[in-house]
Amino acid sequence: MNKIVLASNNAGKAREISEILSDYDITVIPQSEFNVPEIPETGLTFVENALIKARNACHHTGLPSLADDSGIEIDALKGAPGIYSARYAGEGASDSDNVKKALSELKDIPEQQRSARFQCLMVLLEHEKDPTPLICQGSWEGRILTEPQGENGFSYDPVFYVPEHQCSAAQLTAEQKNALSHRGKALMQLTEKIKPLITPEKVYD
């Protein structure tokens, strides 16, 4: 369990996950290093999609695999874009395209009705046929701004207002974001669950 394949080709996710796990004796290897092919995300929930991606990475590498499926739920849009966050503006859409579409659909919605949250479902499979995957969930509450602010982060970060810091997620430092974010919360749960499986000297120093 000291070597885990990250079932994602998203550079932003890889960076955040590696930063959060840096204190543990875990080497996170992007699936691109094994030429793992992408697999269609055909699930109807975050957890289904995460399991599909993790199982695919295990199949092609023979190593434990970590996958997450995450997205943003906007209450005024009845929870959209949800599992379609990364392709809200269509297949192959950029982060900017997706943000523009969301802002366009919210243009007549007042500030007090722009509540939203990031969701992250993270799964860890020890092998392809693992019948008891570790599943963790993290949520991050906020609201949608009327225009992007900040240069850090990725995805919907520039339009996600963080009440605790009175700024967008894209204006936070990496440390601030990891302490608050949906992915950070899910990963913290995960590290607690896998402590018995990784090198104790590093975990308990």
Image: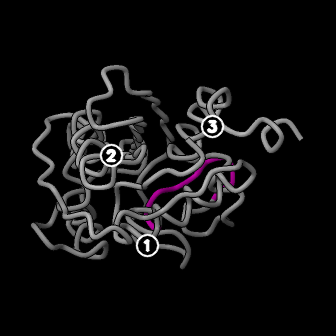
Mark 1 and mark 3: span between their CA atoms?
Answer: 28 Å
Q: Earlier in the sequence, mark 2 or mark 1?
A: 2
Instruction: Give the labeled residue for mark 1.
Output: 148
Quadrant in which the C terminus appears: top right
Residue positioned 58% across, 52% down in the render: 162
Q: Name the disc covering residue 188, or none.
A: 3
Q: Which residues are magenta?
A: 158-166
Outermost residue on the front side: it is: 62
Where in the figure is residue 28, as x and y percent of width and height?
Answer: 53, 58
Residue positioned 63% across, 36% down in the render: 191
> CB under 8 Å between callouts 3 and 2?
no
Q: Name the disc covering residue 116, or none.
A: none
The local secondary structure at tag 3 comes to: helix
The local secondary structure at tag 2 comes to: strand
Q: Amino acid at mark 1?
A: Pro
Mark 2 and mark 1: span between their CA atoms?
Answer: 23 Å
Q: Earlier in the sequence, mark 3 or mark 2?
A: 2
The local secondary structure at tag 1 comes to: loop
Q: Amino acid at mark 3?
A: Met
Q: Nearer the viewer, residue 59 or 21?
A: 59
Can you tell which of label 1 and label 3 is closer to the viewer?
Answer: 3
Mark 3 and mark 2: span between their CA atoms?
Answer: 16 Å
Q: Residues within 10 Å of mark 1 (few under 14, many from 20)?
A: some
The image's colour scheme reads: one colour
- Taking the magenta stretch, the answer to whether it contains residue 140 is no
Q: Residues within 10 Å of mark 2 (few under 14, many from 20)?
A: many
Where in the figure is residue 181, as x and y percent of width and height?
Answer: 56, 47
Outermost residue on the bottom side: it is: 151
